[in-house]
Image (tube, helix red, strand yellow):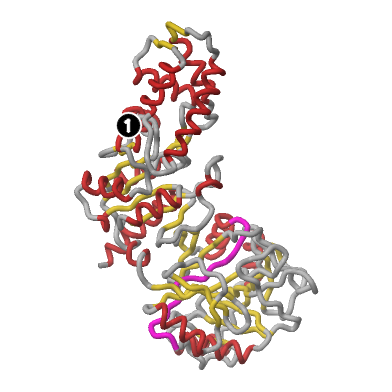
Amino acid sequence: MIPNLTVGDLTIDCADAMRARGFYARLTGWEKTVAYGCPALKTGTGMTILFAEPDTAYIPPVWPEEEGREQKQAHLDFTADDLPSAVEQAVRLGALKAVARYGEHCVTMFDTEGHPFCLCKRQEKSEFESYFKKKGYAVIPNPSVNIDCPDTKKLREFYAALTGWDTAFHPAALVTGDGMVVHFMQADFEYIPPVWPEEEGRQQKHMHFNFQVDDLTAAVEEAVRLGGSKAARQYGADHFVTMLDPDGHPFCLCKRSGYMRMKKKKPKMILFDYGHTLLYEPGFDTLRGEEALFKYIISNKNNLTPKQANDFSQALFAEIGLVRETGLEMHERQFQRFLYEYLEIELSVSLPEAEKIFWDNTSAGAIMPNADRIIDYINANGIRSGVISNIGWSGTALEERLNRLLPRNTFEFVIASSEYMFRKPNVMLFELALKKAGLSCGDVWFCGDNIKADIEGSASAGIFPVWYEDETVENPWRGQYNQTLPECEHLHIHDWTELIDVLEESDASEGLR
C-alpha cells in the first residue's frame, strides 16, 4: 500500500470542458471551481472532478458496446429518490436517455459529451444503505465510479492493495476514505484497454484518477510491485508520473507539493506579460502604420512609397530578429531612427511621436477576454501588480497603451525589454521585478502565454508561473513558441475568470488556517 495516498481528483475527458462542467453542476448542484487550470467541480464529499479536453479529438463511447467502436472505460452512477423526475431533469439539462435499459431501478443516460451515466433509484433498505448508515452516512455519497475490466477480482485486488480502500462493502467494489464507491465491472464484451498517450483511431481512456502521494519515487515503485506499470511517455517531470493499472487504465501519481501548497497562499503580487495575456493587436498591419507616418514626411529624397519603405523595414526587422533570438532586445526608436535616416526620409514629428503614430495605426490594440475583470479583482483584493514584456516598443508607449485600454490598472512598474536590453526568459528580468517590488519570489505569481519566456522563465526565478492559454483570440505566434508542455510546476488556465476562482479558493483556504 502507498502510505497517505489520497484521491486528488477524477478527471473526465470531453470535447468541451466548460459545457461538461456546466451540465454536471446543474445536475448535481456541486460547486464550480478550477483546478490545475481545468474547469472543475467540488462534490458533496469534497472530492474534485476535473473536466479536460484531450490533445487528440475526443471520441464519445458507444453503449451498448458494438464491435470495433469506441468503448466506455468507466462511468458514474447517481442515486435519486424520485427516479422519473431525475431522468426528466437530466434530459432538460441536455442529457439523452439511452434506448437500452437493464433493470427496473436504473436508467442509463448520456451526458453532453456522450459519456454514459446511470440514475438509480435509492433503495432505503438495500445492502448499500445499511452499510453506509453504519459508516455515518445518511445516503450513499454521490457519485460512485464504475471501472470496466476483463477480471473484476484481479483489478479490485490491485486497487485495494494500492490504496488501502475499504474492502468490506461488496466483493466487486471498494469504498474510498470519503465514502465514494468504486465498482469494478467485468465486461460482457471483449474489453479493449485504452491507448495512452492518445492515438487517433485508437481506444481512448475517458476517465482517470489522479492520486496525491508524499513520496513520488516510492509510490511508483510500490505501484509497479503490485502489478502496475509506468507509462512509456511521461509529461510530469518530477511532479507526477502516469501509470497503467494491470488492465491498462491510466492513473497518475502526483507529488503532494508545489501548486497544492501554493494554491492555498494568495500572492502579494501578480506580474503579467503584455501580448496575448493582457492585450492583443488585432489586424496588425505595418503597411498601414507606414502610410499613417508618411503623412508627416517633409523630405523624401528617393521618392519612396509607403510600401517600399515597409518592405525594406520588414526585411531589416527579420535580420534583427536573429539578434533577438539570442536574448537581446532592440528599441523601436533606434530602429526608426536608422530606418528613416538610411532611407533619407525626414519627418516633421519627433521619434516618440513617430513611434506612437506608427504603432497606433498598425493596430490600436484590444483587451484579452476578461483581462479587465482580473485587474479589477486584484485591485479590489489588495494584490499588487506589474508588467514584464518582451517588446521593442518603448516603455512609455507600452504604458500609454496599457493605461488607455486598461484604465483601472494599478501597475507599479512596467518592464519593457526594449528599455532593459534583455528578453525573457532571462532570469535577471524577473529578479529585477522582485527588487522593484521589494518582495521574495514566494510572494509573487507571473502570468503569461509563452511557455519558454513566461512560464519557465519566471519559474527559474522561483516565481510561481500561471500559463494563460486563451483559445478564443487568434494568436499567429502560438504554434511557434508553445510546441511542448512546460517543464516546471505551474497553473494552467484558459480564461481570467479561472484565475479569479483560484484566488477565491486561496482566500477560503487562508481563512481556515
- Residue 84 picture location, percent across and down: 66, 69
- Residue 227 picture location, percent across and down: 55, 88
Residue at horizontal 40%, vertical 26%?
Answer: 335
Residue at horizontal 56%, vertical 75%?
Answer: 231
SS for tag 1?
A: helix
Residue at horizontal 48%, vertical 30%?
Answer: 317
Query: What residue would you read off at disc 1?
Result: 395
Q: Is residue 2 magenta?
A: yes
Would residue 203 be found to the left or right of residue 212 on screen?
Answer: right
Residue 298, visible in the rendered structure: yes
Question: 67 and 240: which one is in front?
Answer: 240
Question: 415 and 19: which one is in front?
Answer: 415
Residue 410, visible in the rendered structure: no
Highlighted range, magenta: 1-16
- Residue 322 picture location, percent across and down: 46, 39
Tell which residue pokes out farthest to the right in this image: 67
Would residue 6 be found to the left or right of residue 118 on screen?
Answer: left
Would residue 5 be found to the left or right of residue 209 on screen?
Answer: left
Question: 278 and 461: which one is in front?
Answer: 461
The quarter holding residue 396 reads top left
Quadrant (top left, top right, bottom left, bottom right) of the C terminus: bottom left
150 w.r.t. 327: above or below: below
Q: Residues within 10 Å of mark 1 (few under 14, many from 20)?
A: many
Quadrant (top left, top right, bottom left, bottom right) of the N terminus: bottom left
The residue type indicated by label 1 comes to Gly
Tell which residue pokes out farthest to the left in this image: 438
Q: Is residue 217 magenta?
A: no
192 w.r.t. 344: above or below: below
Residue at horizontal 37%, vertical 78%?
Answer: 214
Question: 425 and 321: which one is in front?
Answer: 321
- Residue 158 picture location, percent across and down: 55, 88
